[in-house]
Amino acid sequence: MPTVLAVAVLGGLGAMARYGIERGMAKSSVNFPWGTMIVNVSGSFILGVFFALAIERAYGPSWVRVGVVLGLLGGFTTFSTFSLQTFRLIEDGAYGAALGNALGGLALGLVAVSIGVVLGRAF
């Protein structure tokens, strides 16, 4: 139960942090989604540090590790998870899978959002 609670609470905090950054940057950005860029890049950096310090070394309780990765950073950005998974594939020498994940994730995401927009606009 502590894992579920950690994911829920930290997920809310991650989402609130993302909202705060997006809102703050929306006032100052011109024709570029700087808020999203900052969230995605900083989330990827934080996940990389946390992965190396806590997950690889199994430091701290598992509910904290899961809460931070899936909750806090998952609520903040899923791009960080996507980036880490692609990095791990590269690190494991699975270059084709890494390329497929990177290009496939981007391409399928664009297709999915396009279909979603078309369907959403139809109703």
Image (tube, rainbow, N blue to C red):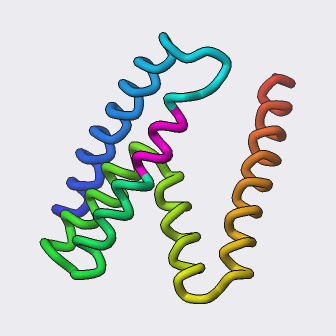
Q: Which residues are magenta?
A: 36-43
Furthest residue toward left: 60
Report how many numbered discs are placed on residues in the image: 0
- Name the residue located 29 percent from the left edge and 54 percent from the top edge: 7
Q: Residue at position x 21%, y 54% from top?
A: 5
User: Does residue 115 sit above or below 3 in this rendering?
Assistant: above
Q: Where residue 38 sits: x, y (%)?
A: 47, 37
Which quadrant is the N terminus positioned in? Answer: bottom left
Asked where in the image residue 107 lies, by quadrant, the reply is bottom right
Q: Nearer the viewer, residue 14 or 7?
A: 14
Q: Quadrant of residue 51?
A: bottom left
For residue 74, above or below residue 24: below
Q: Position of residue 58 (x, y in %)?
A: 21, 80
Which of these two is toward me, 79 or 29? Answer: 29
User: For the point 76% across and 63% down, which residue is it?
Assistant: 104
Identify the residue at the far top of this view: 27
Q: Would you say the magenta stretch is mainly helix, strand or loop? A: helix
Residue 69 in percent (x, y) is at: 34, 60
